[in-house]
Structure formats: C-alpha cells, structure tokens
Image (spheres, helix red, strand yellow):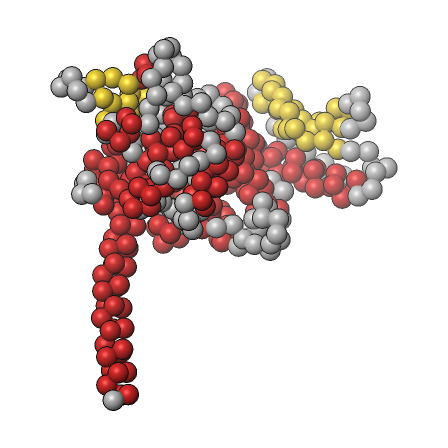
Amino acid sequence: MARPKKSLKVKEPIRIRERKLADGNISLYLDIYVKGTRKYESLGLYLIPESLPNAKAANARTRSIAEKIKSDRIIALQDRGIKQWDKIKRSNMSLVEWLTQYEQDSTGFKPSTLKGRQDMRKKVEMYLEQEGLSYIGMNEIDQDFCRGFLRFLETAKNSVAKKQKDRTISKGCAHHHQAVLNGALNKAVREGILQQNPMKMLDKREKFQPSPEEREFLTIEELRNLMDVPCANEQVKKAFIFSCFCGLRLSDVRTLTWNKIHKMPDGKTLYVHVFMQKTQKPLNVPLSGEALKVLEEKKNPDEPIFKLPTSDATINYHIKKWVKNGHIDKAISFHCSRHTFATMMLTLGADLYTTSKLLGHANVTTTQIYSKIIDKKKTEAVSLVDELFTQQSKEAHGEESED
C-alpha cells in the first residue's frame, strides 16, 4: 500500500516573533523574509505575565491584533513586493498611530491646536472601543468608518462637564472633531498613506455644519456701552476692544508690537502686518481710529503693546467679570471679539469678501456663517415690528370690549 503523500507546508513570508524584556513583558515583532531579503518591524505590542489578573484575555487580544497586522502585511507584500516594504509599512500603520503622530507634529502650531488633535484622537479611541475594534489600519479607513464616527459624535459624552455626567458634546465641538480628523486624513493623502480622503466623499448632509447660534458676539450698542465700564485688568479690556475693531486673534494680539504696525502708501492710514500664529499666513489689517485709541506708545518697538496674563483662562475670567458688570447676559470670551468684528463689519455694510480677507480666512465660506447671523438678526428685528403692532391691536381690542 502506497504511503500517503506528505502535504507541502508553504513557508509564510512573515512570522510573529517574541522578545523577552527585562521587565518581564514580551515584545512582539514581525520577521519578514522574501527572496533573500530580511526585514523586521516592531509592532509596539506587548504580552504581560499571565500571573496578573485578566492577563490571558489581554494577551489573547494582543495576539489577535498582531495576527491582523501580519495578514495585512502579507497581502500588501503580494501586491507590491518586498522592495516597497517601507511604503507598505507606512500605508498599513494603525489609525491611532497615525493620529498620535499627527498630534505630536508641533512645528508652528499652538498648544491649543495640538490639544484639539489630542482630544479628537481620544474620541476616535472611544469610538473604536465602542465598536469592539482593537485595531484598524489606515488602509481600512473608508466612508463607512467616517460615517460611523460622525454618528458616534452625535451622542458622545462630554468628558469635561462635571455637573452633568450624561451631557453630550455640543454640535460645535462635534464639528471641530470632524474638521480635525479631516485635516489628519488630508495630511495622510499628502504623504501617500491614503490615495484619497474618504471624509470628502460623504454627503454634506451627513456632516456637522457650523452653527451660527454658537458664535457669540457683542452688538455695536453693547460694545459702545461696555467701553465705559471699568475692568479689573485694564490691559485685558484694551486688548479686547482693540480686537473688536481689527479682528485679530488673542495669539496675535499677545505678540503685537509697534514694529508690526506700518503706514500705508497714503502716509496716513496705519495697518498691522502679522503672520497669524494659527495659520502661519501673512495678514494686513488697516487700523481704524477707534482701534488706535487703545494702543499705548512704547519706547521699545519690539516690546508687546499689551501686557496680558500668560493664561488664556485668566484673560477670559477678567472679560467675563467685566461683561457681567456691564449688565450684558452673554457668554463672552476673548475670541468673541473676533466674532464682534466680523458681525460689525457686515452690519455696517462691508461685503463678505472684504470681511473674509480682513479676518484672514482662507475660504469665504468660513465667513458666511457671520452673514447668516446678521440675516437672522434682521429677521428678528422685523418680527419685533409685527409683535409691536399685534400687541397694540390687542390692547385696543381690549379697551373696546370694556366699553
């Protein structure tokens, strides 16, 4: 009787290897060998001693992630070959790894920008945990993933709200997370990690839109009255009023010096020339007489014009108290000065394009939100006329009934 033929075992091009560490954990890495070429890839995954509670379940999840990465790498190798290994590795990195790199790219960005990237990354991790996805590669990010994440944001919990544990994040916050993720995916496209940004393929109705109601501002009358109200920190007050008349962000007002203020060709009009810290783009803003009134002369032209507290929170604290003393019931922060400038320009008849340029917006659609605010206020004003005459009619009718 003939012996059964031995089945040939196909040698895998990639194997998961283990390396014991000094702390007792075991590091997992990939050993790649194809056509005489050997590569190694650290996975950043670790097995913990199984003497610890729940260690077996945790290690099982870790091994499952490692197997998933290994399978993705094998498929990519078959498509592209070992010579493209570095590109394969980059395009198949995990989403969380890419978002972590994105938030650590601090070149030219404010701490608040990096904090926004960190907050978005944490929301993505919460979404992955909710969906039971311990690992997802960049090559798996598609329209469905983006759509699912945006749906998750609709009911995502606000981790900052201490008084209301079940409070969800605002639509404005969700819109910000959406914008930051979109930026991260755009960068992935620029660096060749993704072929296209799946977020851009979603229908507009599936995305969060900026809400006019969330952009608080002062009316011209409120600003005029508030200018006569004393503030515990007069430098904060002056900086805020200045920004109301030019639209500069707090980051740019902080670093404003007389060296950044120049004369226009007419020899009379002064303007501010700055590289906006948020966008790193140049901006020229003509200064009105009202803006110039709050600027103090400095012996040193490189000295900041306004002496402001180092903490943004302290600045906003002073503004909040000042506005309250002015009997204005609005949640006003320093950034609202920028909203005030935009709405004031449009109210006084400036066109949308000019206002957009004065604000330094890259796209006029960003400025349109202020136009919607003005339109809403106009509608409310007209409605007041109806209410006035309706009330007068009712009163007249009531008097006639009594007779």
Most extreme residue toward the top is 300
Picture quadrant of residue 230: top left
Quarter of the picture holding the C terminus? bottom left
Picture quadrant of residue 236: top left
**In the rendering, at what x and y percent does residue 37 appear?**
58, 17
Most extreme residue toward the front is 403
Q: Which residue is pictured at 19% across the width and 22% down the height?
A: 269
Is 157 positioned to the left or the right of 228 in the image? right
Most extreme residue toward the right is 51
**In the rendering, at what x and y percent does residue 107 appear?**
46, 21
Quarter of the picture holding the N terminus? top right
Q: In the displayed structure, would residue 372 be above or below residue 344? A: below
Picture quadrant of residue 325: top left
Q: In the displayed structure, would residue 80 be above or below residue 298? A: below
Q: Which residue is pictured at 83% across the width and 38% down the height?
A: 52
Is any part of residue 146 visible from this angle?
A: no
Q: How many marks?
A: 0
Q: Is 327 in front, or is 304? A: 327
Q: Which residue is pictured at 38% across the width and 29% down the height?
A: 239
Is any part of residue 225 visible from this angle?
A: yes
Q: Is 230 in front, or is 153? A: 230
**In the rendering, at what x and y percent does residue 176 appear?**
44, 42
Is 317 positioned to the left or the right of 305 in the image? right
**In the rendering, at what x and y percent does residue 151 appear?**
48, 53
Q: Which residue is pictured at 41% across the width and 23% down the height?
A: 306
Q: Is 124 in front, or is 49? A: 124
